[in-house]
Image: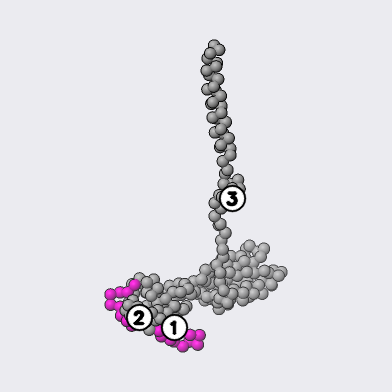
Amino acid sequence: MKIWINRALPICVLSFVAFSTSASGQAAAPHPADGDPTAPAAPDTTVVPPHVDAAYVIGNDDVLSINVWKETELSRQIPVRSDGKISLPLIGEVQAAGRTPNQLQQDISDKLKNYITDPQVTVIVQQINSLKFNVLGQVNKPGSYPLTAGTTIVDAIAVAGGFKDFAKKKSIYVIREDASGNEHRFTFNYQAFIKGANTDQNIALKPRDTVVIP
């Protein structure tokens, strides 16, 4: 009996040491949530509101976020109608197109003073849909498209699906109307452009420009 105990004891001791080492190693392993400075940071899910210049003039189809402080029933996202107006509870229709966000929030605030003491109104242009350009003529998808910063004539042609077979690529032009209502034309020779000539003709488009491909 004594011999069996002497032989079994080292095995038990070794098993206990192995178990203790394993458990100690597991406890020492840091968890990312325990403040490990080398652990990757959690992704930032903060929603950043779109930046719109204070001088931006609201147009038809733009989507506005209107917030009235402490008045959740009056706060909402709302599109500007084709007649340039929006409708709000209590005050009814308000002209939005042609106004800057600051001007519109002052207009809304003035109207709400008949119903609320010292209304605090914020207007944010959530989505710009009024800045558009047109593509007409010999392209696969003529129509009106949203204008983003830096869109050129070549970009417009690509967005409109490219040329049809009989498009006159040397005779493209852009129609632009200035603030006085005067019409200006800018010519664009696509054939020369792709050969590296007249690259300055590939101008950046402005709102309401119309690209015509004969």
State the mark number for residue 176: 1
* Tag in front: 2 or 1: 2
Between discs 1 and 3, the one toward the N terminus: 3
Residue 134 lies within the magenta run? no
Q: Residue at x 55, y 12 (%)?
A: 2
Q: How many marks on residues?
A: 3
Q: CA distance from mark 2 to mark 1?
A: 23 Å
Label 1 sits on what residue type? Arg
Give the magenta-colored segment's residue range: 162-186
Q: CA distance from mark 2 to mark 3?
A: 56 Å
Helix, strand or loop at label 1? It is strand
- Mark 3 sits on what residue? 37
Between discs 2 and 3, the one toward the N terminus: 3
On screen, residue 33 above or below 15:
below
- Mark 2 sits on what residue? 197
Which quarter of the figure is the N terminus placed in? top right
| Main SS, magenta residues | loop
Q: Residue at x 35, y 71 (%)?
A: 161
On screen, residue 179 above or below 94:
below
Furthest residue in direction right, as rendered: 117
Between discs 2 and 1, the one toward the N terminus: 1
Q: Provide residue 82's location: percent of width, then percent of height.
A: 50, 74
